[in-house]
Image: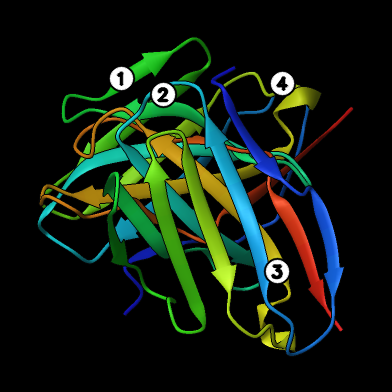
Amino acid sequence: RKEVEQDPGPFNVPEGATVAFNCTYSNSASQSFFWYRQDCRKEPKLLMSVYSSGNEDGRFTAQLNRASQYISLLIRDSKLSDSATYLCVVKANQAGTALIFGKGTTLSVSS
Amino acid sequence: DAGITQSPRHKVTETGTPVTLRCHQTENHRYMYWYRQDPGHGLRLIHYSYGVKDTDKGEVSDGYSVSRSKTEDFLLTLESATSSQTSVYFCAISESGENYGYTFGSGTRLTVV
């Protein structure tokens, strides 16, 4: 089983739509969780951290379910500029461990 | 944006030649990482460093070595480049190894022919 699994998509949605991405992770020792965004031929950039209580940043909402080892990202009122690949990322709380990346989910928002 | 630069941005090299990629940061962050990104595999960790002269292997370290003689520089060397090492290489830095996300460089696109 892959450490971090995501539906690769692509998700093709119209502007204004609400879209949700899901992610599962296999290491129950994972303690830190993030969503990154990567534009075509660019470096990944941190979109938001994911907290146990869930958190929101504008149109973006992240949820964490530790019991199910499941992370989600909800994007409301999609914009053309949201088109990108979204990477689910986890990290175990052990000294020396690095971030583990999912392969990403591709979103295409059309007008 | 954080001060992290990678060089070169693009490189074409021949099989069997050594290649060194450089990552330079101006943030004085302790942790530095090298990842490669390939279609179908996502980002995979090659090596990382948790301080000057302190490095460790990642998931795909075979065929690669690293060095960190100064806080600001982390070098990745392909001892003898192979076609399977054609990839996009990203360097990343982190203020702390625990709960902080990483900041990535712009990447080096390496082609081994």
Q: Position of residue B95 (x, y in %)?
A: 31, 27
Going from the N terminus, do you reach mark 4 or mark 1 first? 4
Closer mark to the observer between disc 1 and disc 3: 3
Where A78 falls versus B38 (above or below)? above
| Contact (Cβ within 8 Å) of mark 3 with mark 4 | no
Residue drawn 25% across and 49% down?
Answer: A91
Discs 1 and 3 lie in a common subunit: no
Residue topped by disc 1: A55
- Decide: few, some or many residues near mark 2? Use Cα within 10 Å; few <14, some 14-19, many ≥20: some
Residue topped by disc 4: A16
- Residue B70 relative to residue B51: left or right: right
| Contact (Cβ within 8 Å) of mark 4 with mark 2 | no
Q: Amino acid at mark 1?
A: Asn
Residue drawn 44% across and 13% down?
Answer: A57
- Residue A6 relative to residue B3: left or right: left
Mark 2 falls on what kind of element? strand
Residue B38 bears which disc, if any? none
| Contact (Cβ within 8 Å) of mark 4 with mark 1 | no
Residue topped by disc 2: A61
